[in-house]
Image (tube, helix red, strand yellow):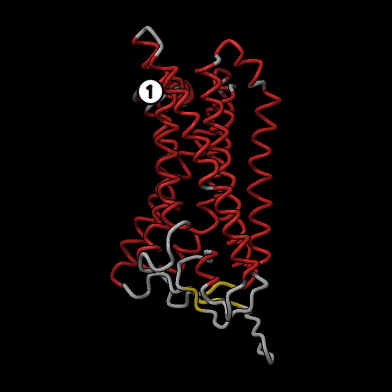
Amino acid sequence: MQGENLTVWSFFLLEGFSRSPALEIVLFVFSLVTYLIALLGNSTLILIIVRDSRLQTPMYLFLGNLSVLDICYTSASIPTLLVNLLSSQKTIIFSGCAVQMYLSLAMGSTECVLLAVMAYDRYVAICDPLRYPVIMSRQVCMQMAAVSWVTGCLTALLETSFTLQVPLCGNLIDHFTCEILAVLKLACARSLLVDTIMLVVSVLLLPGPMLFICISYVFILSAILRISSAEGRNKAFSTCGAHLTVVILYYGAALSMYLKPPSSSSQEVDKIISLLYGVLTPMLNPIIYSLRNKEVKEAVKKVLGRIPLYRTHGHL
Protein backbone atom coordinates (compact mmCIF):
# COMPACT_ATOMS: atom_id res chain seq x y z
CA MET A 1 0.00 0.00 0.00
CA GLN A 2 1.61 3.20 -1.13
CA GLY A 3 1.01 6.69 0.22
CA GLU A 4 2.45 9.98 -0.76
CA ASN A 5 5.43 9.99 1.60
CA LEU A 6 5.33 6.55 3.21
CA THR A 7 5.12 2.95 2.11
CA VAL A 8 3.63 0.46 4.56
CA TRP A 9 4.66 -3.09 3.70
CA SER A 10 2.35 -5.99 4.57
CA PHE A 11 5.12 -8.55 4.01
CA PHE A 12 8.88 -8.80 3.53
CA LEU A 13 11.07 -10.84 1.23
CA LEU A 14 14.03 -12.55 2.87
CA GLU A 15 17.12 -12.70 0.66
CA GLY A 16 18.67 -15.40 2.82
CA PHE A 17 21.31 -17.35 0.92
CA SER A 18 19.56 -17.11 -2.47
CA ARG A 19 22.77 -15.89 -4.10
CA SER A 20 24.34 -19.30 -3.35
CA PRO A 21 21.71 -21.91 -4.33
CA ALA A 22 24.18 -24.79 -4.04
CA LEU A 23 24.88 -23.79 -0.45
CA GLU A 24 21.22 -23.83 0.61
CA ILE A 25 20.91 -27.63 0.88
CA VAL A 26 24.13 -27.83 2.90
CA LEU A 27 22.91 -25.04 5.20
CA PHE A 28 19.51 -26.74 5.54
CA VAL A 29 21.09 -29.99 6.76
CA PHE A 30 23.53 -28.14 9.02
CA SER A 31 20.82 -25.91 10.52
CA LEU A 32 18.35 -28.77 11.01
CA VAL A 33 20.88 -31.03 12.73
CA THR A 34 22.28 -28.32 15.02
CA TYR A 35 18.76 -27.05 15.83
CA LEU A 36 17.56 -30.53 16.84
CA ILE A 37 20.70 -31.11 18.92
CA ALA A 38 20.21 -27.72 20.59
CA LEU A 39 16.57 -28.55 21.42
CA LEU A 40 17.47 -32.01 22.73
CA GLY A 41 20.50 -30.86 24.72
CA ASN A 42 18.85 -27.87 26.36
CA SER A 43 15.59 -29.73 27.06
CA THR A 44 17.57 -32.57 28.67
CA LEU A 45 19.51 -30.09 30.80
CA ILE A 46 16.29 -28.42 31.98
CA LEU A 47 14.79 -31.83 32.77
CA ILE A 48 17.68 -33.05 34.91
CA ILE A 49 17.94 -29.70 36.75
CA VAL A 50 14.24 -29.88 37.63
CA ARG A 51 14.27 -33.57 38.60
CA ASP A 52 17.59 -33.86 40.49
CA SER A 53 17.49 -32.36 43.98
CA ARG A 54 21.30 -32.05 44.02
CA LEU A 55 21.07 -29.50 41.23
CA GLN A 56 18.71 -27.15 43.10
CA THR A 57 21.47 -24.58 43.55
CA PRO A 58 21.96 -21.02 42.23
CA MET A 59 24.36 -22.04 39.47
CA TYR A 60 21.91 -24.57 38.04
CA LEU A 61 18.96 -22.23 38.43
CA PHE A 62 20.77 -19.77 36.16
CA LEU A 63 21.87 -22.59 33.85
CA GLY A 64 18.24 -23.70 33.50
CA ASN A 65 17.28 -20.14 32.55
CA LEU A 66 20.11 -20.11 29.99
CA SER A 67 18.76 -23.29 28.42
CA VAL A 68 15.25 -21.82 28.18
CA LEU A 69 16.74 -18.73 26.51
CA ASP A 70 18.65 -20.86 24.00
CA ILE A 71 15.54 -22.83 23.05
CA CYS A 72 13.49 -19.64 22.58
CA TYR A 73 16.27 -17.86 20.68
CA THR A 74 16.83 -20.62 18.14
CA SER A 75 13.10 -21.27 17.76
CA ALA A 76 12.50 -17.61 16.91
CA SER A 77 14.41 -17.79 13.63
CA ILE A 78 15.64 -21.27 12.67
CA PRO A 79 12.24 -22.84 11.73
CA THR A 80 11.63 -19.92 9.32
CA LEU A 81 15.13 -20.34 7.92
CA LEU A 82 14.58 -24.08 7.34
CA VAL A 83 11.33 -23.45 5.45
CA ASN A 84 12.86 -20.69 3.33
CA LEU A 85 15.94 -22.73 2.44
CA LEU A 86 13.64 -25.18 0.66
CA SER A 87 11.24 -22.60 -0.75
CA SER A 88 11.46 -20.34 -3.78
CA GLN A 89 9.13 -17.81 -2.10
CA LYS A 90 11.06 -16.57 0.92
CA THR A 91 8.46 -14.29 2.50
CA ILE A 92 7.34 -13.30 5.99
CA ILE A 93 4.35 -11.17 6.94
CA PHE A 94 4.89 -7.87 8.76
CA SER A 95 3.56 -9.10 12.12
CA GLY A 96 5.68 -12.26 11.86
CA CYS A 97 8.74 -10.14 11.14
CA ALA A 98 7.99 -7.94 14.16
CA VAL A 99 7.60 -10.95 16.47
CA GLN A 100 10.77 -12.56 15.13
CA MET A 101 12.78 -9.36 15.59
CA TYR A 102 11.46 -8.86 19.13
CA LEU A 103 12.05 -12.43 20.30
CA SER A 104 15.59 -12.55 18.89
CA LEU A 105 16.48 -9.23 20.54
CA ALA A 106 14.77 -10.12 23.83
CA MET A 107 16.42 -13.53 24.18
CA GLY A 108 19.84 -12.22 23.11
CA SER A 109 19.67 -9.22 25.45
CA THR A 110 18.49 -11.34 28.37
CA GLU A 111 21.38 -13.74 27.84
CA CYS A 112 23.87 -10.84 27.98
CA VAL A 113 22.61 -9.89 31.44
CA LEU A 114 22.24 -13.49 32.62
CA LEU A 115 25.86 -14.33 31.75
CA ALA A 116 26.96 -11.39 33.92
CA VAL A 117 24.73 -12.65 36.75
CA MET A 118 26.31 -16.11 36.42
CA ALA A 119 29.77 -14.53 36.64
CA TYR A 120 28.74 -12.83 39.89
CA ASP A 121 27.46 -16.17 41.21
CA ARG A 122 30.87 -17.78 40.52
CA TYR A 123 32.64 -14.80 42.09
CA VAL A 124 30.69 -15.13 45.35
CA ALA A 125 31.05 -18.94 45.38
CA ILE A 126 34.84 -18.80 45.06
CA CYS A 127 35.80 -15.51 46.69
CA ASP A 128 33.33 -15.58 49.60
CA PRO A 129 32.29 -19.25 50.02
CA LEU A 130 31.26 -18.99 53.69
CA ARG A 131 28.66 -16.31 52.97
CA TYR A 132 27.59 -17.81 49.63
CA PRO A 133 24.38 -19.47 50.93
CA VAL A 134 23.31 -16.17 52.51
CA ILE A 135 24.25 -13.85 49.63
CA MET A 136 22.91 -16.15 46.91
CA SER A 137 19.71 -17.30 48.59
CA ARG A 138 16.98 -18.79 46.40
CA GLN A 139 14.92 -15.60 46.65
CA VAL A 140 17.88 -13.44 45.57
CA CYS A 141 18.64 -15.80 42.67
CA MET A 142 15.03 -15.70 41.48
CA GLN A 143 15.11 -11.91 41.62
CA MET A 144 18.38 -11.73 39.67
CA ALA A 145 17.02 -14.09 37.01
CA ALA A 146 13.83 -12.02 36.80
CA VAL A 147 15.82 -8.80 36.39
CA SER A 148 17.71 -10.40 33.50
CA TRP A 149 14.48 -11.33 31.72
CA VAL A 150 12.78 -7.98 32.36
CA THR A 151 15.84 -6.02 31.19
CA GLY A 152 16.15 -8.04 28.00
CA CYS A 153 12.44 -7.93 27.18
CA LEU A 154 12.06 -4.19 27.84
CA THR A 155 15.13 -3.13 25.84
CA ALA A 156 14.00 -5.38 22.98
CA LEU A 157 10.53 -3.81 23.09
CA LEU A 158 12.09 -0.36 22.94
CA GLU A 159 14.33 -1.21 19.98
CA THR A 160 11.64 -3.09 18.05
CA SER A 161 8.88 -0.52 18.51
CA PHE A 162 11.03 2.39 17.32
CA THR A 163 12.54 0.40 14.43
CA LEU A 164 9.10 -0.57 13.08
CA GLN A 165 8.10 3.11 12.95
CA VAL A 166 10.95 3.99 10.58
CA PRO A 167 9.76 4.56 6.97
CA LEU A 168 11.12 1.81 4.71
CA CYS A 169 11.88 2.24 1.01
CA GLY A 170 11.90 -1.46 0.20
CA ASN A 171 10.79 -4.84 1.51
CA LEU A 172 13.72 -7.07 0.48
CA ILE A 173 15.69 -7.88 3.64
CA ASP A 174 19.23 -9.01 2.85
CA HIS A 175 19.23 -11.61 5.63
CA PHE A 176 17.66 -14.97 6.47
CA THR A 177 15.69 -13.46 9.36
CA CYS A 178 14.20 -10.12 10.37
CA GLU A 179 17.45 -9.05 11.98
CA ILE A 180 17.17 -5.47 13.19
CA LEU A 181 20.29 -4.11 11.46
CA ALA A 182 19.26 -5.68 8.15
CA VAL A 183 15.78 -4.14 8.43
CA LEU A 184 17.22 -0.71 9.23
CA LYS A 185 19.23 -0.83 6.00
CA LEU A 186 15.87 -0.47 4.19
CA ALA A 187 15.16 2.86 5.92
CA CYS A 188 14.46 5.78 3.58
CA ALA A 189 16.56 8.00 5.86
CA ARG A 190 18.67 7.50 8.97
CA SER A 191 16.84 8.15 12.24
CA LEU A 192 18.98 9.83 14.89
CA LEU A 193 16.62 8.62 17.62
CA VAL A 194 16.77 4.96 16.52
CA ASP A 195 20.56 5.13 16.01
CA THR A 196 20.95 6.57 19.52
CA ILE A 197 18.71 3.92 21.09
CA MET A 198 20.59 1.15 19.28
CA LEU A 199 23.97 2.53 20.38
CA VAL A 200 22.98 3.01 24.02
CA VAL A 201 21.37 -0.43 24.31
CA SER A 202 24.30 -2.12 22.54
CA VAL A 203 26.84 -0.48 24.86
CA LEU A 204 24.80 -1.28 27.97
CA LEU A 205 24.20 -4.93 27.03
CA LEU A 206 27.50 -5.86 25.35
CA PRO A 207 30.61 -4.03 26.65
CA GLY A 208 28.92 -3.30 30.01
CA PRO A 209 28.24 -6.89 31.11
CA MET A 210 31.44 -8.09 29.42
CA LEU A 211 33.51 -5.63 31.49
CA PHE A 212 31.73 -6.81 34.64
CA ILE A 213 32.49 -10.44 33.73
CA CYS A 214 36.17 -9.64 33.09
CA ILE A 215 36.52 -7.85 36.45
CA SER A 216 34.77 -10.74 38.22
CA TYR A 217 37.18 -13.25 36.69
CA VAL A 218 40.21 -11.20 37.70
CA PHE A 219 39.12 -11.62 41.33
CA ILE A 220 38.12 -15.25 40.74
CA LEU A 221 41.50 -16.13 39.21
CA SER A 222 43.29 -14.40 42.07
CA ALA A 223 41.26 -16.41 44.60
CA ILE A 224 41.82 -19.71 42.75
CA LEU A 225 45.59 -19.22 42.68
CA ARG A 226 45.53 -18.82 46.47
CA ILE A 227 43.85 -22.21 46.96
CA SER A 228 46.47 -24.54 48.45
CA SER A 229 45.18 -27.94 47.25
CA ALA A 230 45.45 -28.98 43.62
CA GLU A 231 42.04 -30.69 43.85
CA GLY A 232 40.41 -27.47 45.05
CA ARG A 233 42.00 -25.46 42.25
CA ASN A 234 40.91 -28.01 39.64
CA LYS A 235 37.32 -28.01 40.92
CA ALA A 236 37.20 -24.18 40.87
CA PHE A 237 38.67 -24.04 37.36
CA SER A 238 36.17 -26.66 36.21
CA THR A 239 33.09 -24.78 37.45
CA CYS A 240 34.33 -21.49 36.00
CA GLY A 241 35.78 -22.89 32.79
CA ALA A 242 32.40 -23.90 31.35
CA HIS A 243 30.91 -20.46 32.00
CA LEU A 244 33.95 -18.67 30.61
CA THR A 245 33.88 -20.78 27.43
CA VAL A 246 30.22 -19.92 26.85
CA VAL A 247 30.94 -16.21 27.48
CA ILE A 248 33.75 -16.17 24.90
CA LEU A 249 31.59 -17.91 22.28
CA TYR A 250 28.57 -15.70 22.90
CA TYR A 251 30.24 -12.30 23.20
CA GLY A 252 32.70 -13.03 20.42
CA ALA A 253 29.85 -13.52 17.94
CA ALA A 254 27.68 -10.72 19.37
CA LEU A 255 30.45 -8.11 19.34
CA SER A 256 31.42 -9.01 15.78
CA MET A 257 27.81 -8.40 14.70
CA TYR A 258 26.70 -5.32 16.64
CA LEU A 259 29.80 -3.30 17.48
CA LYS A 260 31.73 -3.21 14.23
CA PRO A 261 32.02 -0.53 11.51
CA PRO A 262 29.18 -0.95 8.97
CA SER A 263 31.55 -1.50 6.05
CA SER A 264 34.06 -3.80 7.77
CA SER A 265 32.62 -7.01 6.25
CA SER A 266 30.19 -8.11 3.57
CA GLN A 267 26.55 -8.88 4.28
CA GLU A 268 27.19 -12.53 3.35
CA VAL A 269 29.80 -12.79 6.10
CA ASP A 270 27.37 -11.16 8.54
CA LYS A 271 24.73 -13.76 7.65
CA ILE A 272 27.15 -16.65 8.22
CA ILE A 273 28.20 -15.20 11.59
CA SER A 274 24.55 -14.70 12.52
CA LEU A 275 23.72 -18.29 11.59
CA LEU A 276 26.61 -19.69 13.62
CA TYR A 277 25.65 -17.40 16.50
CA GLY A 278 22.04 -18.53 16.25
CA VAL A 279 22.51 -22.30 16.18
CA LEU A 280 26.03 -23.24 17.27
CA THR A 281 26.13 -21.40 20.61
CA PRO A 282 22.77 -22.80 21.84
CA MET A 283 23.86 -26.27 20.70
CA LEU A 284 27.26 -26.07 22.43
CA ASN A 285 26.07 -24.59 25.75
CA PRO A 286 24.61 -27.82 27.25
CA ILE A 287 27.47 -29.87 25.82
CA ILE A 288 30.09 -27.58 27.41
CA TYR A 289 28.38 -27.62 30.81
CA SER A 290 27.82 -31.40 30.68
CA LEU A 291 31.35 -32.34 29.66
CA ARG A 292 32.99 -30.16 32.30
CA ASN A 293 30.62 -30.87 35.17
CA LYS A 294 30.66 -34.04 37.24
CA GLU A 295 27.31 -33.27 38.91
CA VAL A 296 25.55 -32.92 35.55
CA LYS A 297 27.06 -36.20 34.31
CA GLU A 298 25.86 -38.02 37.42
CA ALA A 299 22.40 -36.49 37.07
CA VAL A 300 22.21 -37.65 33.45
CA LYS A 301 23.20 -41.18 34.54
CA LYS A 302 20.50 -41.06 37.20
CA VAL A 303 17.80 -40.00 34.72
CA LEU A 304 18.92 -42.54 32.08
CA GLY A 305 19.06 -45.24 34.73
CA ARG A 306 15.28 -44.93 35.14
CA ILE A 307 14.73 -45.82 31.47
CA PRO A 308 14.11 -49.61 31.16
CA LEU A 309 15.73 -49.84 27.71
CA TYR A 310 18.83 -48.10 29.04
CA ARG A 311 19.07 -50.33 32.10
CA THR A 312 18.79 -53.44 29.94
CA HIS A 313 21.13 -52.62 27.07
CA GLY A 314 23.77 -50.23 28.26
CA HIS A 315 25.22 -47.77 30.66
CA LEU A 316 26.80 -44.28 30.41
Decide: few, some or many residues near mark 1? Use Cα within 10 Å; few <14, some 14-19, many ≥20: few
Query: What residue do we see at 46% from left, 63% from top?
Result: 81
Q: Is residue 56 above or below residue 212?
A: above
Quadrant housing residue 112: top right
Residue identifier under label 1: 312
Q: Position of residue 280 (x, y in %)?
A: 40, 48
Residue sitting at the far bottom: 4
In percent of width and height, residue 86 lies at 40, 69
Of all residues, the one furthest to the left in this rendering is 22
Vertical comparison of 132 with 203: above or below: above
- Front position in the image: 202 or 149: 202
Q: Is residue 34 left or right of residue 58?
A: left
Please tell me which residue lies in front, 185 or 191: 191
Above-or-below relation of 306 to 62: above
Q: Residue at x 45, y 46 (%)?
A: 251
> SS at mark 1?
helix
Q: Is residue 49 left or right of residue 277?
A: right
Q: Residue 28 in the image: x percent, y percent?
A: 37, 61
Looking at the rendered image, the quarter that the N terminus falls into is bottom right
Which residue lies at the image location 38% right of the left edge and 57% below the top edge? 273
Q: Nearer the viewer, residue 46 or 139?
A: 139
Q: Residue at x 42, y 33 (%)?
A: 244
Q: Where in the figure is residue 316, as x and y percent of width and height?
A: 35, 24
- Residue 124: quarter of image: top right
